[in-house]
Amino acid sequence: MKTRTFAALLLAALLLPAAALAGGGRKVAPIADPVVAKECGACHMAFQPEFLPARSWEKLMADLANHFGDDASLAPAARERIRAYLVANAAGVAPGKESRKVADSVPANATPLRITETGRWARKHRPGEVNPVAFASAKVKSKANCAACHTGAADGYYED
């Protein structure tokens, strides 16, 4: 069983770059700001801003002292730089087809604070596509651990 899992993961890793290029390149723009990548990536994957609308990023950045049960407070200059980057590149703001899809999956009056609360995430991870037990596995641990299954997540590749 372990050999088959390893072989499947190895094959996916080898085919991922070719599949992404054949599909027209990146699906989501990777984090381009080194402060965002460093500060957000210090505790979790630095999520691309296109996954949430600007109003969600504004709300998340306004209360970093209570960031999903942790204190993620930052110096004011770093907080403002990150907030500005996230808002400027949020779903519905950032150019590109993927951003529009993500924005369309969030009702206009909703302010999701988790990417896993968006309609697009739910559609892409529905039972039958993804085994719900996988999210509790030792490898994945959480629905927010995108890189556990999407090995190219940090570079914007999620269609694997």
Image: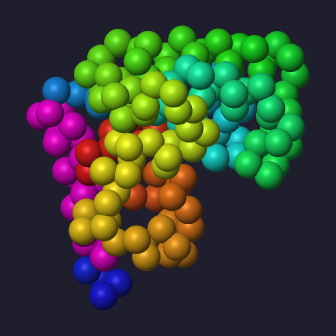
Q: Is residue 31 above or below residue 120?
A: above
Where residue 141 appears, as percent x and y from the top left, is 56, 67
Q: Residue at x 57, y 44 (%)?
A: 114
Query: In front: 3, or 153?
Result: 153
Q: Residue at x 76, y 42 (%)?
A: 67
Its colouring scheme is: rainbow
Q: Residue at x 69, y 28 (%)?
A: 59
Where residue 96 appears, as percent x and y from the top left, is 30, 17
Q: Is residue 149 above or below residue 5?
A: above
Name of the residue lying farthest toward the left? 22
Q: Is residue 10 in sight in this rendering?
A: no
Query: In front: 151, or 114?
Result: 114
| Dominant secondary-structure state across the stretch colored magenta | helix
Name of the residue lying farthest toward the bottom? 1
Q: Is residue 22 left or right of residue 99?
A: left
The image quadrant of residue 106 is: top left
Q: Is residue 157 in sight in this rendering?
A: yes
The image quadrant of residue 100 is: top left
Query: In front: 113, or 20?
Result: 113
Q: Is the N terminus in the top left, top right, bottom left or bottom right quadrant?
A: bottom left
Residue 19 included in the magenta stretch of the image: yes
Q: Is residue 44 left or right of residue 96?
A: right
Q: Residue at x 34, y 28 (%)?
A: 104
Magenta part of the chain: 5-23
Q: Is residue 44 left or right of residue 121?
A: right
Where residue 144 appears, as percent x and y from the top left, is 54, 53
Where residue 157 appears, as percent x and y from the top left, is 33, 39
Q: Is residue 62 left or right of residue 6?
A: right
Query: In front: 136, or 29?
Result: 136
The image quadrant of residue 126 is: bottom left
How many discs mark residues in the rendered view? 0
